[in-house]
Every structure is written in structure tokens, then in C-alpha cells.
Amino acid sequence: MNAQYLFDSAEPGEGISYSVRESPRARHVRLRVSFREGLVVVVPRGFDTRLVPGIVRERLPWIRRALEKTAVEEPPGAGTPGLLRLQSVGEEWTVLRKSATGARSVLRERPGRVVEIRSLRDDPAASRDLLLSWVRRKASAELLPRLAARAEAYGFRYGRGAVRHQKTRWGSCSAKGTISLNMKLLFLPPELVDYILLHELCHTVHMDHSRCFWALVERHMSDFRERDRAMKEAFRHVPRFAL
């Protein structure tokens, strides 16, 4: 048995994806975090999986620390891709890698939606870092105006918007009305991005996931349940270098 789940913590806007794996050799429940698989809850055969969300809740501090640690690890083969598919804005960008002629690695945009990275041979991580910075800037330029437009269309008010590179959150809303968006949304289909934007905007009214919150979401997006289910598989749209 190997099933996928999404755990919504008490903190608004935070969801932690995890899988439950049954092992005939396991004697106790174990939590395992890796770059490739994320959070895996290993349970003994016959274990009541209804108890797993409670176990995840109890171990949240450790889980968050472990996920943040894996987010900065450089896994084998996680170099820069040759093509970026930014589904949220319907764009494809070619990534060209060349040897740097100067003393440091640099990134430049070229005509025809080309990102050119000139990196030093002895600094392989520089290409990835440069591309991640470019994705974050691009996400800020595309997602923040979209958030403002959706807020105006739906009739919401929020403090300010920000774009971050987060491991597990797609978005969050603070008590002061600051909405933070994950730059990885740039890789998702537009209908899923719109759902996350609405989700966080609704948190400016209801900071929890109460019935009133979901009723407000449904008032503006009748098919939100289908989109919410699709979000459980959304990380498949994100290229490995950005995970």
C-alpha cells in the first residue's frame, strides 16, 4: 500500500504532501524525508492509517526542519533544464548554458524567450542558483499583478503580496493581510494558479479552514473541489531543479 495525502495544518495556507507506505518489516511508525520522495510515513502492516494525520501533526516541527534541509540539498542530476514550461503564463523559455568568459557566472535574457547562462566550470551550482533567481523574478512580475487583478475582480482587499521559494506551501496569508505566493506556481496550469490566489484571498476574511471559509471560496469558484484535488498532484508540473 502506497497512498498520497495532503495534510492541512492549523496555519492558514500551509499544506504538506506526504505518502503512506506499508512495510511488512516495520515494527513502528517511521517518518522519512528525502529530496526525491518528500515526506513518507512508513507504517507496519495492518496499521490504522486514520491515525497518521495525528502523527504528522505531532511531528510538524521536525517535518518542517527536515523539508527545509532537503530544499537546499543539491541532488545528483538536478542541474538546469534545457526548457522551461511556464504554464501559468503560456510561455516556453529555452535555457542555454555556456562557459563564462569573466570571473563569475552570469544570466541574461535573449530575444526569442531565451535564457542564457554563462557559468564557471568549477562552480556547477551557480547555474541553478542563477536560474532560480530568474524564476523568482519572473514569478513576481507575473503573479503579483495577477493577484491584484483577482482581488479587484472578487472584491477582496489585502495588505501586500510577496513571492518566495518555499518547499511545501503554495501560498499563505498572514494576520496582517500579507499574501505570499510560491514561485513554483509559475509552472502550474492557470486554473490551479487562480485557485491558489482565490484561496489566499479568502483567508483575508477567514483565517481558518472553517465552513464559512469554504463557502466563501465556493461563492467565487464553484468547481474549487476539482481544483483542490488537482493540487495534490501539482508538484509534477515543477521541474526538479526548482523543487
Image (cartoon, rainbow, N blue to C red):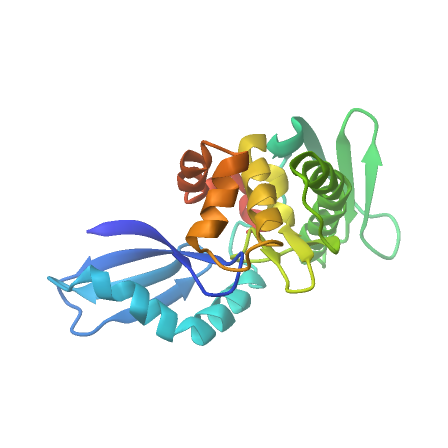
Q: Position of residue 78 (x, y in %)?
A: 55, 50
Q: Which quadrant of the structure image shows residue 156?
A: top right
Query: Is 92 placed left or right of 16 in the picture?
Result: right
| Above or below, 5 relative to 84 | below
| Above or below, 72 relative to 129 | below
Q: Position of residue 197 (x, y in %)?
A: 61, 43
**Residue positioned 86% across, 48% down in the render:** 101
Query: Is 139 placed left or right of 237 in the picture?
Result: right
Residue lying at the far right of the rendered structure: 102
Query: Is 202 placed left or right of 141 in the picture?
Result: left
Q: Which quadrant of the structure image shows residue 114?
A: top right
Residue 203 seen in the figure: yes
| Above or below, 104 relative to 193 | below
Residue 124 seen in the figure: no
**Residue positioned 31% across, 71% down in the render:** 55
Q: Position of residue 189 (x, y in %)?
A: 55, 32
Q: Nearer the viewer, residue 226 or 80?
A: 226
Q: Position of residue 186 (x, y in %)?
A: 63, 40
**Residue positioned 70% across, 31% down in the render:** 93
Q: Nearer the viewer, residue 97 or 228?
A: 228
Q: Nearer the viewer, residue 122 or 137?
A: 137
Total count of labels? 0
